[in-house]
Image (cartoon, rainbow, N blue to C red):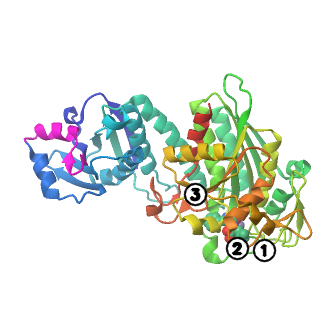
Amino acid sequence: MVIRVKTTRRKVFEHEAPARVVAVLGGQLSEEGRWLDAHMDGVLARFLKKSKFSGKFGEYAVYATDELQIVLFSFGKRRGHTLEQVRQAGVKLIEIAARLPSRDIALENFLADRFGKKETSYSLAEGLLLGAYSFDKYKSRAESKRRNFVIAQGFGPAVDKARTVAEGVYFARDLVNEPPNVLTPVELARRAEALAAEAGLEINVFGPDKIAELGMGAYLAVARGSDNEPRFIELVYRPEEAASGHLALVGKGLTFDTGGYSLKPTNSMTTMKGDMSGAAAVLGAMKVIAALKPPVEVRAYVAAAENMISGRAYRVDDVLTAYNGKTIEVLNTDAEGRLTLADALAYASAQKPVALVELSTLTGSCVVALGRMVAGLFSEEETLARGVARAAEEAGEKVWQMPMEPAYRRHLQSKVADLKNVGSREGGAIQAALFLAEFADAPFVHLDIAGPAFVENAEDNPHGPAGGTGFGVRTLVRWIERQS
Ligand code: BES
Ligand code: MN
Ligand code: ZN
């Protein structure tokens, strides 16, 4: 849906929009709702009674006349609400608005009395914008409904910021949803270059020769099987006033993962265009950072590649040497993400960041453990882990900390090299995280986003449709803002 979100100083009942939305809390009209009701001779209160809300969040009823539609939107209980519910109300209102005949819809600034106009305007606008996303560039006939939302007594700059953040999420979602025949590593780099030019970021892109020269032997081995060349992408945001130290972001950038010779079965291979979701999140976050201009330097790294089969492809039993000199015995070519990340993490570490946050659709094991709606957070640095977890919580992106059990390192011991790229099946997500930690030489957080990055059912995405979710963009932006 194409939407516009604006604010007004007026209250909902003063607004002339034909459609208006007010909250119901604990079965009672909100203050705004009561004002509106007073102007309608108590019709709304009577309609609410008849509607028999059960008390669940997200229930709604529409009181409609020829020229007016009043939506009563339930926030469930009377107290104990969260800003995430305001965000989700925004998402839900997209669905509701699509069914309303009116284009212009005035919204109460939900829960502003509790959280303040600024925070609620931000969350509501963010929910509306995230919910309105659709990816239909390959549909010959796309329906494009338009709706204009006005947040009553809203805070304009908060809505502007929500728009900036949502544009970063859209950017990430578009990259994830783009089919793999279009979004090759070369194309991913091209889009990063376009972003850099537009947003004023510095960029370096390396091809296979430079990657080999740098000694990124693990990454190069994964990339070698494809006719689509790899591209290593480095993006730098420098604040106006030179800062000491920088933050580093790394994203897994497999534009497609067939599994290689350890080939995936058909049903596991579908959705593997989403195996660059970590890269998408990192690039989306850089887009937002370039616009918000926090006073901290941020560098982002993506080792983009495609995991394919050919006469040049890497095999199991191969031994590879990574950027930091460590050797890796390949036992499964489908554990390719950690190989590309080994070099990206080692390269990022060599620039001596203050902290290093990496996102990857790394393991099916993490999806089994935490399901589709929660990412795994792995770190040996408690303070950093808490900082990222807090940012995720504020962003409404669910993460759960998993243990970096040191005893499981033994599963990665190889007879012929320093490490092997897979251990045992049990605790697979933890072993993958332990593997990555061997290549990160800085305070390090790994987010396994294999579950929430790409969902086949919209119910698994609390902030939009099925497909790429852009998971991680908003967590990264919050985290970076908090560091400055
Ligand atoms: N890209 C996959 C992980 C994945 C699985 C992402 C499901 C999203 C949904 C990764 O490259 C992979 O294949 N991992 C293997 C590791 C195994 C061979 C140790 C896995 O999880 O099966
Ligand atoms: Mn794989
Ligand atoms: Zn993969």
Q: Nearer the viewer, mark 1 or mark 3?
A: 3
Query: Which residue is at the far front?
Result: 407
Q: Is residue 142 left or right of residue 366?
A: left
Name the residue tied to disc 1. 261
Whichever of labels 3 and 2 marks the residue nearer the N terminus, that label is: 3
Name the residue tied to disc 2. 425
Determine whether 444 is above or below 436 in the image: above
**Amino acid under label 3?**
Ala
Q: Residue at x 76, y 56 (%)?
A: 436
Q: Residue at x 81, y 46 (%)?
A: 347
**Amino acid under label 1?**
Tyr
Q: Is residue 157 left or right of residue 203?
A: left
Estimate the spatial distance between the alpha carbons at disc 2 and disc 1, rounded to whole Å.
19 Å
Name the residue tied to disc 3. 375
Query: Which residue is at the far left?
Result: 41
Q: Which residues are magenta?
A: 24-41
Q: Residue at x 21, y 58 (%)?
A: 53
